[in-house]
């Protein structure tokens, strides 16, 4: 058996799977996000560790005792700054923090070739601009920085005492030469950092260390090996078998991601497409990233006084394109294709006849339309996407799937256990690290539960609203 741990934004998930990838048990411990100022998004690193321990210890003790290896996945881009004693110097700055927009321009001016090195635009979500912001705004803190770790890698430090990371997560820092799969001295230097402050780099299925004796004892395990693991999206892809050239998935978690595995490094920064390393050797991937997806459902359901199942039921009862209501899902800004941390969400077309059902329908459509914008950017770059495996909490709604398939003009494949997400991939990477088996043997597609084909008639009904949606961004972005 193998344990996968996913350090998410809203919670830490732990899952134990068999050698055949069958889910035996899972548990989640919640996390809170601090937003002390506009554009800011932070978390306490100690909370990741306490939530990790809570999630692991919530798993059955007999299963924990049989774990042979552990893999880690986690939210990307978070800046965890450690001092000389390896204690955090401040709250971690998260992936959906938008404060460092000016620092992005500063980085690109300092390294004119940055886009060719990193394969990406400098965006506030990445780690490097956050460190430049700390250097500019909190110089006393910056002067004490001895190490910078990503969220899952801080948890690794607590588990094993090792400072290590994998290629897929590190590619999201803007410090990695993504094509060469190595730290870039030019990008580090522009941030005022050097290699000695970075973790050691590993491929996702390589062992980085073993559980500390005290942690192993507390968790009721042996001192099992810990694999490098993956950033959340690459981990989710490994979990559902998106590991070969052209394989693609749609992740409907707090954020929304369309992920396409590629055999070559194929950047397209001009349209805010991400090009990162995959968590497997000699593989890369492209992504369109949307900062708010299933989180919009949680937010809107709370506003409407509904639970999430009731929200989906209300939307289905209203029907697609039920009215003129339109939702722009930019609650935390947007990445692909706009790279705009300042834009905010909007509800348009409201009238006296607007009710909870029509509002719910508009929210589901708005997220689908944003994803369609991202997929269009991928397709413009020459990436062919006809089928998407669906993972994440949003995968539970079949009705939303019909809206998504029609808006994206792509077949959606739902998989058994797909909602487990990155934790499943982390467990599979642990299995590869322990057994030496290949990705082709371990990272296989789970059984298909159902498939949703794009409905041309529904696409025709949604098309006018999609066109209005695209015009609406230009209308609100300066507000």
Image: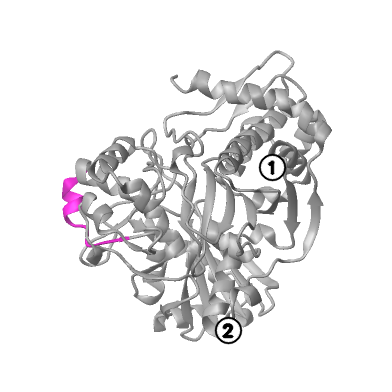
SS under mark 1: helix
Q: Is residue 17 visible?
A: no
How far, Cα to Cα, is label 2 from label 1? Answer: 36 Å
Identified at 60% across, 38% down, the residue is: 376
Quadrant of the rendered image containing residue 358: top right
Q: Residues within 10 Å of mark 2 (few under 14, many from 20)?
A: some
Report the residue at 31% width, 45% height from top.
129
- The magenta stretch is 138-148
**Residue 475 in picture, x, y percent from top left:** 52, 18
| Position in image of residue 368 (x %, y %) | 66, 37
- Residue 450 or 459: which is nearer the viewer? 459
- Closer to the chain start, of discs 2 and 1, is 2
Name the residue carrying label 1: 308
Q: How crowded is mark 1: few (under 14 residues within 10 Å), some or many (20 or more)?
A: some
Task: Identify which residue is drawn at 70% across, 66% down.
Answer: 445
Residue 153, image x, y percentages: 40, 65
Query: Does residue 206 belong to the magenta stretch?
Result: no
């Amino acid at each position: 058996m193998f344990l996968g741990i996913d350090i998410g934004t809203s919670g830490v998930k732990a899952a134990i799977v068999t050698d055949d990838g069958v889910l035996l048990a899972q548990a989640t411990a919640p996390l809170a996000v601090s937003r002390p100022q506009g554009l800011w998004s932070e978390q306490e690193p100690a909370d990741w560790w306490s939530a990790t321990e809570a999630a692991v210890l919530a798993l059955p003790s007999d299963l924990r005792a049989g774990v042979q290896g552990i893999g880690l996945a986690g939210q990307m881009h978070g800046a965890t700054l450690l001092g000389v004693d390896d204690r955090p110097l401040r709250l971690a700055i998260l992936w959906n923090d938008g404060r460092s927009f000016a620092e992005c321009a500063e980085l690109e001016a300092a390294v004119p070739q940055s886009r060719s090195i990193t394969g990406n635009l400098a965006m506030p979500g990445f780690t490097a601009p956050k460190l430049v912001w700390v250097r500019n705004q909190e110089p006393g803190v910056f002067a004490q920085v001895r190490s910078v770790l990503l969220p899952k890698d801080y948890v690794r430090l607590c588990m094993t005492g090792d400072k290590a990371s994998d290629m897929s997560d590190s590619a999201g820092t803007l410090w990695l030469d993504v094509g060469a799969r190595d730290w870039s001295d030019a990008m580090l230097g522009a941030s005022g950092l050097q290699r000695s402050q970075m973790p050691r780099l590993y491929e996702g299925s390589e062992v980085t260390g073993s559980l500390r004796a005290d942690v192993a004892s507390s968790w009721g395990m042996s001192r099992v090996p810990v694999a490098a693991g993956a950033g959340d999206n690459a981990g989710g892809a490994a979990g559902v078998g998106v590991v070969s050239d052209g394989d693609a998935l749609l992740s409907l978690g707090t954020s929304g991601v369309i992920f396409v595995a590629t055999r070559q490094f194929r950047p397209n920064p001009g349209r805010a497409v991400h090009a990162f390393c995959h968590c497997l050797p000699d593989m890369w991937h492209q992504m369109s990233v949307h900062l708010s997806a299933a989180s919009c459902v949680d937010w809107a359901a709370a506003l409407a006084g509904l639970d999430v199942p009731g929200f989906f039921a209300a939307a289905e009862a209203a029907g697609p394109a039920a009215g003129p209501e339109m939702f722009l899902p930019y609650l935390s800004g947007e990445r692909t294709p706009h790279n705009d941390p300042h834009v905010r969400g909007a509800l348009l077309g409201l009238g006296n006849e607007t009710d909870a059902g029509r509002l719910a329908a508009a929210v589901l459509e708005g997220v689908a339309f944003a994803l369609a914008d991202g997929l269009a950017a991928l397709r413009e770059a020459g990436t062919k996407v006809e089928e998407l495996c669906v993972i994440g909490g949003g995968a539970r709604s079949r009705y939303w799937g019909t809206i998504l398939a029609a808006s994206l003009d792509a077949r959606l494949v739902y998989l058994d256990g797909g909602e487990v997400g990155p934790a499943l991939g982390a467990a599979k990477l642990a299995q590869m690290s322990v057994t030496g088996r290949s990705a082709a043997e371990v990272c296989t597609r789970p059984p298909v539960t159902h498939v949703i084909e794009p409905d041309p008639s529904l696409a025709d009904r949604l098309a006018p609203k999609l066109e209005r949606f695209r015009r609406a961004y230009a209308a609100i972005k300066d507000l």
